Image (cartoon, helix red, strand yellow):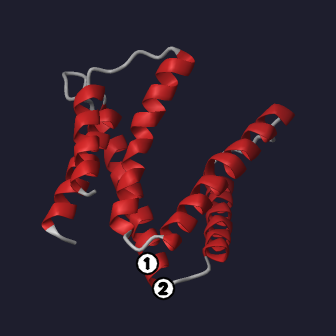
Amino acid sequence: MTRRKILAVGLSFGGVVLVMAGGIDENFSTEKIFGALSCIIAAACYGLFSVLNKKRRLNQKFAMMIIWATTAACAFVAGYFFEQWLFPNARQIVGLLWLGVMINAVAYLTWALALEKTSDTARTANLAYLVPILAIFISTFAFGEELSPAVIPALILILGGILINK
């Protein structure tokens, strides 16, 4: 990690946090702080997984299968002991399959394969910061959601981080 990479990651990550929090204003509640911290911890865990997975040069497809099976087992156990079970209807099952296969499995496997093919993991990983910005624009144009005032400064931070790391 060079200073330049640390600056790039810091700028981009700051932009993501700004978007996620909806900007810093009087409505910045403890729920937003908890959500932001949860996302930061999740991102750190996934980043650690990605780095260790690349360093160990594991088979990406097999590693992802083990990760998803472990996650499913943990979710089942946690759900069994801490939640009331309701059997989903057909529409919910289709939604769960869509989320599980297309949104998660395909995306994470594609990401793992991209990291496997690159020689500069930090530069490739920096592109992941575009996801929240793309999600905002898609939700704005596809669903008519209103843009938060935090989007423009966040976009500048994220793109600045990406360009610095280029």
Q: Amino acid at mark 1?
A: Leu
Using the rendered view, name the quadrant where residue 48 is placed.
Answer: bottom left
Label 2 and label 1: CA atoms lie apart by 6 Å
Label 1 environment density (alpha carbons within 10 Å; few <14, some 14–19, many ≥20): few
Q: Is residue 148 above or below residue 20?
A: above
Residue at the limit of the structure toward the right, as seen here: 90
Q: Nearer the viewer, residue 71 or 61?
A: 61
Q: Position of residue 148 (x, y in %)?
A: 32, 21
Please report the residue visible at 65 percent of the width from the left and 73 percent of the height from the top. 66
At 67% across and 61% down in the image, what residue appears? 72
Q: What is the x, y in percent for residue 102?
A: 69, 47
126 up-or-down from 146: above or below: below
Which disc number belongs to residue 56? 2
Where the C terminus falls, by quadrant?
A: bottom left
- In this picture, residue 81 sits left or right of residue 33: right
Asked whether, in this view, residue 24 is left or right of residue 103, the answer is left
Q: Is residue 85 left or right of residue 47?
A: right
Question: Which of these two is toward me, 94 or 16?
Answer: 16
**Image quadrant of residue 120?**
bottom left
Residue 5: give x, y in percent of width and height: 22, 63
Q: Secondary structure at mark 2?
A: helix
Q: Where, by quadrant of the figure, is residue 86 drawn?
A: top right
Which residue type does callout 2 highlight?
Arg
Residue at 39% of width from left, 52% of height from top? 127
Q: Which residue lies at the image location 48% right of the left edge and 85% below the top edge?
A: 56
**Do callouts 2 and 1 mark residues in contact (Cβ within 8 Å)?**
yes
Where does label 1 land, which residue? Answer: 52
Q: Residues within 10 Å of mark 2 (few under 14, many from 20)?
A: few
Horizontal and vertical percent position of residue 97: 76, 46
Left of 61 or right of it: where is 128? Answer: left
Label 1's element? Answer: helix
Look at the image and tell me in which quarter the N terminus lies.
bottom left
